[in-house]
Image: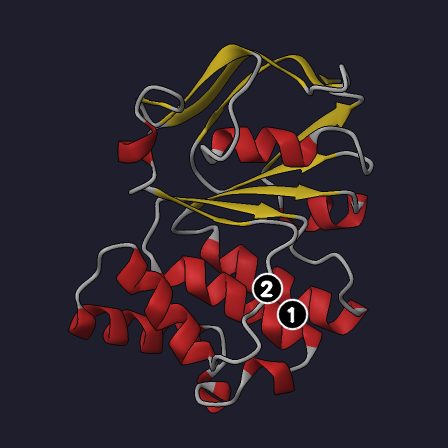
Amino acid sequence: MGKLECNSLTKVYQDRRKALDNVSFSVETKGIFGLIGRNGAGKTTLIRILATELQPTAGTASINGYDVFKQESKLREHIAIVPQEARAIRWMTPKQMVYSYLLWRGYGYNQAKKLADESLAKLGLAQYTNVLTSRLSGGTKRKVLIATVMASEADVIFLDEPTTGLDPISRRELWEILKTLGKDRFIFLTTHYLEEAEQLADQIAILKEGQLV
């Protein structure tokens, strides 16, 4: 079993705001890991660093033996992320979105089509396969984003506040999907909902003002 390890991660932005302050922890990459914190606690900064989207000011990190900063190209083959600001592409259908994403990751045409169909079916989206995402509900659009990263077969999936803004029913539907997904992949989930972390996470950490508490 692999591990995700952070050692003294620190991030100071140009305005001298310290988003992360000496964050260190180690977790096995299995199940669902929940990171709780208020808005501005540093959750998005941490998840962007671990997903190779942002360089830290200091510190090191590794995922399943890959150095996040020295082996980012290799690591990206094994991870996928749904950022907090991610949105379904309005002029694409769910199948086009998933299919295009897989092609971008290097899958062949036939395999990308197969994986896209399978992923959409698993999330109960088969009936929306060829419907423009602009016509879908907010909860369904979020499921399309989850289906996209799930289709990639990535070992590690980062989800930054994936249920923010959803109604209670859609949120619970997505919870069930994530519970199932967490049986086969490692999910790193950020949230500011305590109930969500309690329902989903096998392990929980709390981030406050850039520090792990």
Could you tell me which residue is drawn at 75 percent across and 56 percent down?
Answer: 164
Name the residue carrying label 1.
173
The label shown at residue 28 is: none
Q: Amino acid at mark 1?
A: Glu
In this figure, which colouring scheme has been used for the structure?
secondary structure
Visible residue check, residue 121: no
Residue 62 percent across, percent down from the top left: 40, 21
Could you tell me which residue is drawn at 74 percent across and 26 percent down?
Answer: 207
Q: Is residue 204 above or below residue 81?
A: above
Q: Is residue 86 above or below residue 132?
A: above
Q: Residues within 10 Å of mark 2 (few under 14, many from 20)?
A: some
The label shown at residue 176 is: 2
Q: Is residue 153 above or below residue 57?
A: below
- Quadrant for the N terminus, please: top left
Residue 191 percent across, percent down from the top left: 71, 44
Q: Is residue 162 above or below residue 40?
A: below
Q: Residues within 10 Å of mark 1 (few under 14, many from 20)?
A: some
Between 161 and 13, the one nearer to me in the picture: 13
Measure how far apart labels 1 and 2 are at the Cα level. 5 Å
Residue 172, located in which quarter of the rendered image? bottom right
Q: Amino acid at mark 2?
A: Glu
Residue 63 percent across, percent down from the top left: 39, 27
